[in-house]
Amino acid sequence: MTTLSQQIINGLSLGSVYALIAVGYSLVYSILLFSNFAHGGFLVVGGYACYFLLTQYGFGIWISITGALVASGVVAIITERMAYKPIRDRTSMTLYLMIASMGVSIVIENIFVIVVGGRFRALPQDTFPHDLFNLGGNVTVNSFDILSLIVAVIFLGGLQLFLNRTRWGLAIRAAACNLNTAGLMGVNVPLLISIVFFVAGLLAAVGGIFLSVRYTLYPQLGGTITTKAFVAAVIGGLGSLPGAVVGSLLLGLAEMLTAGFISSQMRDLVVFSMLVIMLLVKPAGFFGKQVSDKI
Amino acid sequence: MAGYAEGIIVLLSINCIAAMGVSLLTGFTGIFTLGHAAYMALGAYTAAIMTVRYGVHWLPAIVAGGIIAVLVAWLIGIPTLRLTGDYYAIASIGLGEAIRLILENWQSFTRGARGFPGISSYTGRGVAVVFFTILGIGMFNLIESRLGRELKASRDDKVAASLMGFNIPASRMKALLISAFYCGISGALLGGYMNFIQPSMFDMMKSTELTAVVVFGGLGSMSGTLLSSALITWLMEYFRDISQYRMLIYGALLVMIMVLRPEGLLGNREIWSFIPGFRSNTKRRG
């Protein structure tokens, strides 16, 4: 019983970190309708920016985190401008975007391999609170888990407010329905897409910082995590933000429960079987639009 | 012949066989896969286990590698081929990674992540080239056959193709099975060349590479696939001295091709359709 509640809390905390990443991915998907494989790269950029600002340049934690978020967002915008925009300008096939994004993810990963080396790094342990406290019974919780849960809620809530209360939020929701029509209605589409990428990069950086505290930081971190964010987004429904959150939480729970009760080696296998089962039973996910192509 | 050149020829043949398989599925049928390295892994492990543990001759072992890949593809294909577009691509990532993880965790049978050593080097230059030639001739005949036209029709317009009376699900399944067979054979040959296989050799990166090669060459161009496969194999060898930068260059190349020439090297034409006066089926379709 103790293990169960402990693993549930761990699962929710891990899931909330996945949610930050999956929501950014889903946001891009909902506007441009392609799987941005470079999304994991943004997360790695955020992680490394935070690491170097903290350890190398000795900035405070808040400045380092802000710097990481901005760095990630800017890299996301640059990626979009340099790689995706020229492709969007000449063709409507999202396949090309998908392959270009694979190229970008390889480039980002290997820039880090070359510049900082492939070794594993850890953010300094005292950066974030790690005290254990008792939740009644024998359930002890790491305050870091609670922190990541709270931060994820704050950021996702902020995103929700941004999308629902601001003019640009309205424009983004309109573009999610139909990008071309939104453009005809006077929305500045290139700026809108840049904003979407900035937000996605920023959220990925938050997720990246938490993941590099929870595990370690290495250039290939993005690849594994993006795959999980895809799975979460598909379970929730591609392009649906609430879906991405629900899918991520489910995934985090499933992973931690598997690790706690079966074996931690089975975690990834469980993740992929969830993906396959979901695609078989309900390919559109819990909150997705119905797949129109029925043949 | 010098060992280095021989190595390149063997690798080239192996890569081309796998690329032809993926080209049939992605270029000619329009099913975008990101998990085909798993079929290579299945072929490689089948052949390795059969030859090392059961002392089977390498030739039936290679063929068995292809057949196991086909069987698994069939099991996987029944449910997943109903999916389209990004959904199949994402499902194929999941399935490919799942197969790799099973190979990695099935310690008693596959020796897990440490890899499977001691495979006899049965893939020489001769074997690789013979396999490549036979499979190549088969593939070029296939894409001009009735099935090939059916696949192209279903790629270009599914509704129209099914109105013409084609059984689209069945032909998509055939394309998947054949492509899995090619990848299985290619994996089995790779094991015989490297003498050592490891699950991490067949990860998502490898799958991406296979699909990227096909797109480089031009979707719907089999000779384009072979050309780009040769070009990339050679280029990767050429950059071996600056191996740190290899993947970086590879990624940048991928982006640049998509930006500058998204239709790939040859578009959807075969290479002989560029020769003046040479009429071919593929050209008339364009």
Image: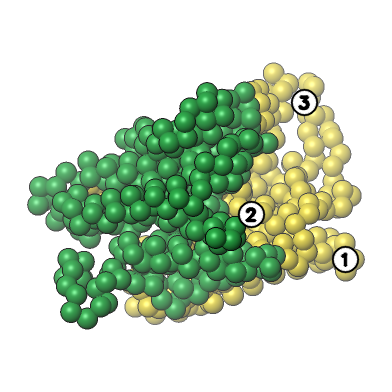
Which amino acid, by three-letter code, is at mark 2?
Answer: Gly
- Indicate the secondary structure of the residue bearing disc 1: loop
Disc 3 from disc 1: Cα separation: 37 Å
Secondary structure of the residue carrying tag 3 is loop
Question: What label does residue B97 carry, if any?
Answer: none
Q: Residue furthest top?
A: A1
Q: CA distance from mark 3 to mark 2?
A: 32 Å
Relative image position of residue A225 (x, y in whole percent): 61, 49
Asked which quadrant contains residue A10, the reply is top right
Which residue, given by chain and number where applicable, does mark 2 sit on? A222
Question: Sequence-wise, which precedes: disc 1 or disc 2?
Answer: 1
Task: Give the percent coordinates (x, y) of residue B7.
Answer: 56, 56
Instruction: Tell me if residue B222 can be seen.
Output: yes
Q: How many C-alpha atoms fall within 10 Å of the one at disc 3: few (<14), some, or many (≥20)?
A: some
In the rendered structure, find residue A56 and report the number of the disc placed on it.
1
Q: Residue at x 70, y 57 (%)?
A: A219
Chain letter for the green colouring in the rendering: B
